[in-house]
Image (cartoon, rainbow, N blue to C red):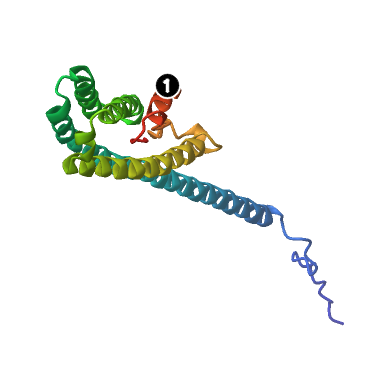
Amino acid sequence: MGVRKVRAPSSSNPHPGPPPLAGEGEKKAQRMEWIILGVIVLLLLWLVVIYNRLVALRQTVGQSWSDIEVQLKQRHDLIPNLVETVKGYAAHERGTLDAVIQARSAATQARGPEAASAAEGALSGALGRLFALAEAYPDLKANQNFLSLQGELSSLETKIAAARRFFNNAVAEFNAAIQSIPAVFFAGALGFTPRGFFELDAAERAAVQTAPQVKF
């Protein structure tokens, strides 16, 4: 009679338990990292869009001011001929003529919208008094050169007024953009600072509005 061999129990578990949770935890951590990375990328893209908009607004302000400067130079260039024409009929009105010349000199040296606002307002007031003076000289009023210069100046004043409105609107939009969230937190550090407006103060505006021919 043979001896029956007893089989030792197998060490392997035919019914394994649940897998360890370490792998699932790593996947969750990776997903969280991708989410955080995506948020950072979106935030950077948002900041780039805001920065590009500020740059575009600043360029609009700069270009619109350059347009005004061109028109102001054209205005300044007409004034010496106007003064010489008036001098031929009213040379003894030295005070009024000198005031125009001095105001023009100050206007040509003004730099930036705020300085130009005061200088151009004073020049408009001086020109207004010069044209009011012409009312007392019928021969001057009938002079073709005087009429031509007067017409050119009046046309330039209209163009400057329109350009000033466009510039001030651009400045208002730019200033509002750099003072809004989130641009307010980094605009100054990146060189985006508020810009000044190009406008006349109350006294200068009143002087211009009383001028019979020139309206600035």
Image quarter in which the N terminus is found: bottom right
Taking the view exactly as shown, the residue that stands out farthest to the bottom is 1
- Residue beneath label 1, please? 203
Percent across and percent down for residue 48 are 45, 47
Q: Position of residue 149 (x, y in %)?
A: 21, 41
Residue 64 visible somewhere in the drawing: no
Q: Relative to 100, does residue 32 appear above or below in the rendering?
A: below
- Of the pair 13 and 80, the residue shown nearer to us: 80
Image: 206 above or below 146? above
Q: Secondary structure at mark 1?
A: helix
Q: Can residue 148 be seen by looking at this rendering?
A: yes
- Can you tell which quarter of the image residue 7 is in? bottom right
Q: Is residue 56 above or below residue 7?
A: above
**What amino acid is labelled 1 in the image?**
Ala
Q: Is residue 84 left or right of residue 171?
A: left
Which residue reaches farthest right?
Answer: 1
Which one is in front, 10 or 41?
A: 41
Q: Is residue 159 above or below residue 203?
A: below
Q: Which residue is painted at 45% across and 23% down in the image?
A: 202
Residue 90: x and y, percent? Answer: 17, 25
45 or 143, nearer to the observer: 143
Quadrant for the C terminus, please: top left
Residue depicted at 23% across the width and 25% down the height: 100
The residue lying toward the viewer, choosing from 194 and 208, is 208
From the top left corner, tell me how far across and down residue 140 is, in percent. 20, 34
> Horizontally, is 146 left or right of 52 in the view?
left
